[in-house]
Image (cartoon, rainbow, N blue to C red):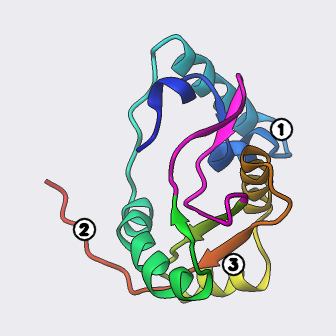
Amino acid sequence: MDNAEERKGCFTASNIGRLLAGGSGATRKSYILEVALDAIGCRAKNLETGATKHGIANQMNAFDFVLKPLYKGIEWADTYIPINKDCGASPDCIWNGNYPIDIKCPYEIDTYLEQVEKMKTAYFYQLQMQMLSVKGDRSALCTYLTKKEEWVVS
């Protein structure tokens, strides 16, 4: 369970790529504004896309079927761990107390192959922040491919 109050108004590992994005700065400025609004209690609703629903629905399968057999003693974490008063991380899993593992669950083969062949820079930044949060010097990214679900909008 996430400590919503503790992470309120903080930069997070899952979005750090937005803060460090290149280009004109629009992505960076947008994220800074979101964090500032969150700090004063004006947080926008989290938008759920098909891709995020898919990831949430399949993370535990990746944990149970891939990570548990490979990493004896791995624990499901998914709890906010502050680095300092301004930022923190929520690793999906932690092995040996200081080895964060993040799970990505794409549903398209092209996206999966891209992630396997070359990790996105944003994921690299995310893992770096997760290592800072648990005071670790190694981390891993698990990419778990499953078929796409059909989501009904109600």
Mark 1 → mark 3, Cα distance in angstroms:
25 Å
Q: Is residue 80 magenta?
A: yes
Asked if residue 144 can be seen in this view, the reply is: no
Comparing marks 2 and 1, which lies closer to the viewer? 2
Across and down, in percent, residue 139 comes to 76, 66
Q: Residues within 10 Å of mark 3 (few under 14, many from 20)?
A: some
Whichever of labels 3 and 2 marks the residue nearer the N terminus, that label is 3
Across and down, in percent, residue 60 comes to 41, 72
Residue occupying the point 55% across, 81% down: 67
Q: Is residue 123 magenta?
A: no
Q: Which mark is residue 101?
A: none
Identify which residue, 142 or 112, lies in the foreground. 142
**Amino acid at circle 2:** Trp
Q: Which mark is residue 115?
A: 3
- The magenta region covers 77-98
Whichever of labels 2 and 1 marks the residue nearer the N terminus, that label is 1
| Label 1 sits on residue | 24
| Label 2 sits on residue | 151
Across and down, in percent, residue 53 comes to 36, 62
Describe the element under mark 3 as helix, strand or loop. Answer: helix
Comparing marks 3 and 2, which lies closer to the viewer? 3
